[in-house]
Amino acid sequence: MAQSKDKLTLLTLNTHSWQEADNASCLFTVAAAIKKEMPDVVALQEVNQKENAPAAGAERLEASGFVSAGSAIGDDNWALLLAEKLGDYHWTWVFAHLGYRTWAEGVAILTRAPVLEVRVGDISLPGIRLRRKALAVRTEKGWYVTVHTGWWEDQQDPFVDQWEKLDRFARELGRPCYLMGDFNNPAHVRGQGYDLILKAGWQDCYARAESRDSGVTVPGQIDGWRQTEVDGFRLDDCFAAQPGRTLRSRVIFNGSFYPVVSDHFGVLTEEVL
C-alpha cells in the first residue's frame, strides 16, 4: 500500500498476546501484514510481557526504536519483539494491570514517523486493581491514542467514569487526534458507551468511511463477552476528534484479509488529511 503525504493509514488490534495456541505464528503474521500494508500508526491493546521478565537492555531498546512512557520493558514484551521484526518503526508501551495472573498487560503504539511526544492517562477510578491506561503519542501528522476500556455495566469501574477521564485526556491533546482501541462497548447497542462517545463529538471513522465492510471485530463469545447472544459485533474502533474524510475501513486478521491472530479482529482505516 503506497503512502502519500495527504493519506494516513491507521491499524488497531487487540493482540491477546501470548494467549494464542501458536504465538510465534501470530507475531509473524502481524509483522508481515504491517510490512505489506505500511500503516502510519499501529495501536495495540493487550500487549503483554511476563510479570517478572528480565529487563530488556538499553542498547536493545534503542535499536528497536523505543521511546519511554515510564514503564519498564521486559525482554519478552510483545511490542518489543514486533518492533524488532519490523525494523523501521518507533514504539512505546505502558503497563496497565496484571492479566491472566502472570502477565503484565499494557497498551502500545508504533509509528513510522518519529515520536515527538508521549503522554499517559490513567482513566480508572482510584483503588481499582484492573486499571485502564490511555497512551498517546504525537508525530508530525498529529496525535494518536491507544486504549483498552472496560465494560458499560462494570460496577467497580463503570465505562461512564472511564470515558469522562479519557475524553478529558484526549481533548487536551492537539489536533488532528485519533482515538483507537478495544472499547468493550458494542457499536450496535444504543444508549450505552458507543453512543456516549458520539455524543461527546467524536466521529466514528467506520461510519463515515466511503468504503467499508461488515465491521465485525468479535465473531462470537470471547473473554468478557461469554453471555452475549449476538453472533458477531464491533468492539474495536477508530474515532476522530475532528471532521474529515475516511476513504476506507476494513477488518483485518479475520481469516480472509490475513489469518486470525487473536480473539479480536483488527481494523485498518485509511484517512485523508
Image (tube, rainbow, N blue to C red):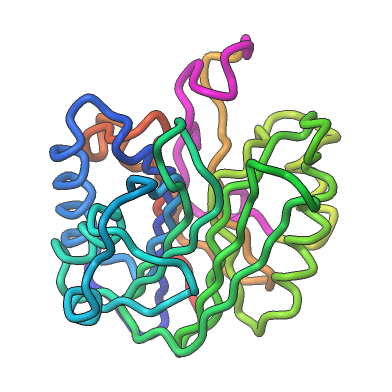
x then y, percent, for residue 78: 29, 52
Left or right of residue 209: residue 186: right
Q: Is residue 73 above or below residue 77?
A: below
- At x 45%, y 85%, the residue is 139
Does the magenta portion include 128?
no
Q: Is residue 192 above or below residue 112?
A: above
Quadrant where the N terminus lies?
Answer: bottom left
Which image quadrant is residue 64 in? bottom left
x then y, percent, for residue 101: 46, 32
Give 108 or 11, whichever is nearer the viewer: 108
Q: Which residues are magenta?
A: 203-229
Give 108 or 101, whichever is nearer the viewer: 101
Which image quadrant is residue 121 in? bottom right
Left or right of residue 201: residue 245: left
- At x 45%, y 38%, the residue is 213
Does the magenta portion include 228?
yes
- At x 73%, y 52%, the residue is 124
Q: Is residue 7 above or below residue 187?
A: below
Left or right of residue 241: residue 261: left
x then y, percent, for residue 154: 77, 31
